Amino acid sequence: MRDIGNMRVVGQCRLGDKDVRVEVPVRLGEEFPFMVIRVEGYGDNESMDGCGSPLVLEVAGGRLRAVIWRDINSVGDPMVVDLEGAREKMRKDE
């Protein structure tokens, strides 16, 4: 995989009576024909720990799709989300 960059997804949650900041390290990479999104501590069933990815972006049949493996213990089919409806040119004028 060719590394593209590292970043952190930052969020906040309530733990008891305190607001807690949560940071999750993310590494972006290119592994033809996919854009791989590796999240520390997350993976897929067929990859070794630290090497897998629960989410990739791909172009299939000319359409951008997100492919998501929701359960590391499942070998079954991933969830595939066609993103063509999210194209900016699809926005309807009000």
Image (spheres, rainbow, N blue to C red):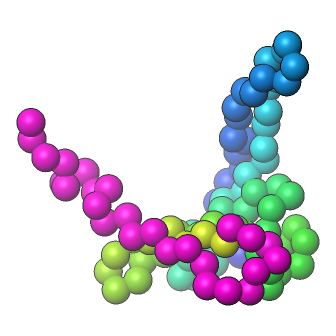
Q: Quadrant of residue 13?
A: top right
Q: Nearer the viewer, residue 17 or 64?
A: 17
Residue sitting at 74 percent across and 70 percent down?
71
Q: Is residue 80 magenta?
A: yes
Pick out the residue farthest to the front.
16
Rendered position, 27 above or below 91: below
- Find residue 33 and report its horizontal and vertical position in percent: 53, 82
Task: Count the labels in the image.
Answer: 0
Q: Is residue 29 visible?
A: no
Q: Quadrant of residue 39?
A: bottom right
Residue sitting at 78 percent across and 44 percent down?
24
Where does the magenta region start and end? 70-94
Residue sitting at 34 percent across and 86 percent down?
61
Pick out the residue farthest to the right.
49
Q: Nearer the viewer, residue 44 or 27?
A: 44
Q: Nearer the viewer, residue 65 or 16?
A: 16
Pick out the residue farthest to the left.
94
Q: Quadrant of residue 54?
A: bottom right
Q: Quadrant of the C terminus?
A: top left
Residue sitting at 72 percent across and 27 percent down?
12
Prevailing secondary structure class for the magenta stretch in the rendered image? loop
Q: Left or right of 93: which side holds 21?
A: right
- Find residue 93 and report its horizontal and vertical position in percent: 9, 41
Q: Is residue 70 visible?
A: yes
Q: Quadrant of the N terminus?
A: bottom right
Q: Is residue 66 magenta?
A: no
